[in-house]
Amino acid sequence: MIGKGKSISHTNASMAYGWNQEKDASVVLKEYLAGETPQELTKEFEIIQSMNENCNRNTLSFVLSPTIEDGKKLSKKGLGDISKTFLKQMKLTNRQAIAFVHRDKAHTHIHLYVNRIDFQGKAYPDSFIGKRSNKAARQVAIEMNLKTVQQVQAEKLKPLQKIRSEIRSIHIQVQKKERPKTFDDYIKKMAANKVKVIPSINKGGTLQGFRFEYSGINLKGSEVHRSMSGGKIANEIAANSSGEILKHSDQAVNIAGKTLELSTNMITGLAKKAIEQTITKGIELGI
């Protein structure tokens, strides 16, 4: 099961989406609410929200997605229990909440809306709410004997164990024997061993990591092995180049003639590697 969460200001529009009958929507949880339409529910939320004028995004919106197989087996009560257990994990009990299930597609999912303002007028902290939502969903899945996203991923990757092992072996061989000093060099050396390395770039042009294509299979670095995340590959190249990768820019690199900003994780990892190298050199020089 996967959980997503964010704080929103468009309560009425979100409630209307949740209660969309074209999506075969039905209510599976209703806490401290009497309304029967999105407009009535929004007004009830607003009565409590008026106690805190400083909070603009005063509704919490969550999407809880069991696996396709689990979703098919879950009853209306079971989906309601997921919502209740999730609220407990997030410490969001004793406040207005409503959850709708959508079954219009193969992937059954829950839209859960919670008043961010409690009955004392205090706003629920929403920092890192997306990450916390996913963690809570995982705990709910474990508690209710449902599949977690990690279990689904493991099942997906198990038949590819041989391919993953071969890609990792080629990566280790390239890093140990050929010691590439730039990302371009690494990509070329992997290609020479029949592994296509594809930079993973987000919409903002930031390098997040790499995908690996081999024998017709395309996998993220972390799916090949945890040691092949973008940050760890960057650290290996930085070690090979004695920090040269950091000299031109602390936040960007050149790949195939393009300048790409590095993700926060990659920047942090490279900065740590630079510090380690400085300390090592100081020890060697007796400083």
Image (cartoon, rainbow, N blue to C red):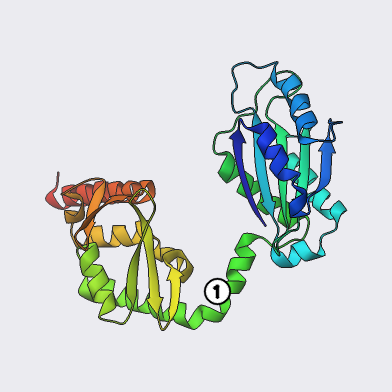
Q: Label 1 sits on what residue type? A: Leu
The residue lying at 67 percent from left, 29 percent from top is 116
**Callout 1: SS:** helix
Pinpoint residue 137: horizontal percent, then vertical percent: 67, 50
Furthest residue toward left: 285
Pinpoint residue 20: horizontal percent, then vertical percent: 74, 47
The quarter of the rendered structure image containing the C terminus is: top left
Per the image, the residue denoted by label 1 is: 157
Q: Quadrant of residue 87?
A: top right
The residue lying at 64 percent from left, 27 percent from top is 58
The quarter of the rendered structure image containing the N terminus is: bottom right
Using residue 143 as the reference point, say whether residue 221 is left or right of it: left
- Residue 34 appearing in the image: yes
Using residue 153 as the reference point, say whether residue 190 is left or right of it: left
Pinpoint residue 229: horizontal percent, then vertical percent: 40, 61
Pinpoint residue 209: horizontal percent, then vertical percent: 37, 59
- Residue 94 appearing in the image: no
Viewer-nearest residue: 213 or 182:
213
Q: Is residue 128 above or below residue 121?
A: below
Q: Quadrant of residue 163?
A: bottom left
Furthest residue toward front: 22
Q: Quadrant of residue 114?
A: top right
Q: Is residue 215 above or below residue 56?
A: below
Viewer-nearest residue: 13 or 8:
13
Viewer-nearest residue: 7 or 174:
7
